Amino acid sequence: MQRQLITLSFGVGALLLATTHAYSQTPRNCGQRDAVIERLASAYGETRQSIGLGGNNRVMEVFASTETGTWTITMTLPDGMMCMVASGQSFENIAQTAPSVSGTAL
């Protein structure tokens, strides 16, 4: 019985060490803002098309290439770390105005 407890303790300890190590690593889709922007420009020809402020002071940006049609949505955290949220193809820049809402209840 005591041998099983020691073996179990070592197993739980190894699991905790592995979990701590995994949390300390930077996610693969994040990096320093300058490096991510450079990669989007050099590898995909993408430039910033729009920008906005999200929750918790996170900057949301859309990068796209009008030549290839690729696009990437990024989120920059207050500490300068930029993460890619989504990406895809067939980007189109559409200039659209909001419809007027006169006399209609929402």
Image (cartoon, rainbow, N blue to C red):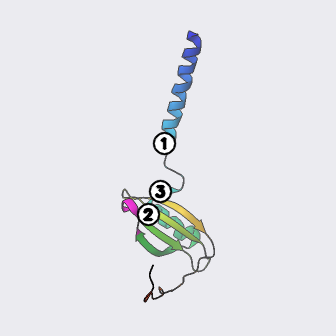
Taking the image as shown, residue 22 lies to the left or right of residue 89, namely left
Q: Is residue 93 magenta?
A: no
Q: Earlier in the sequence, mark 3 or mark 1?
A: 1
The N terminus sits in image quarter: top right
* Residue position marked by numbered label 3 in the rendering: 31
Q: How many dots with numbers? A: 3
Observer-side mark, 2 or 1, equals: 1
Residue 34 is tagged as 2
Residue 43's spot in the image, x, y percent? 58, 68
The C terminus sits in image quarter: bottom left
Q: Is most of the magenta stretch helix, strand or loop? A: helix
Q: What residue do we see at 53% from left, 56% from top? A: 29
Q: Earlier in the sequence, mark 2 or mark 1?
A: 1
Q: Nearer the viewer, residue 65 or 85?
A: 85
**Within-10-Å neighbours for mark 2: few <14, some 14–19, many 20+:** few
Q: Callout 1: helix, strand or loop?
A: helix
Q: What residue do we see at 49% from left, 66% from top? A: 38
Marks 2 and 1, Cα distance to the nearest angstrom? Answer: 23 Å
**Within-10-Å neighbours for mark 3: few <14, some 14–19, many 20+:** some
Residue 23 is tagged as 1
Q: Can you say whether 18 is above or below 48 in the image?
A: above
Q: Nearer the viewer, residue 18 or 42?
A: 18
Q: What residue do we see at 54% from left, 21% from top? A: 10
Q: Which residues are magenta?
A: 53-57
Q: Can you say whether 95 is above or below 46 in the image?
A: below
Marks 3 and 1, Cα distance to the nearest angstrom? Answer: 15 Å
Circles 2, 3 touching at the beta carbon (< 8 Å): no
Q: Is residue 56 magenta?
A: yes
Name the kind of residue labelled 1 in the image.
Answer: Tyr
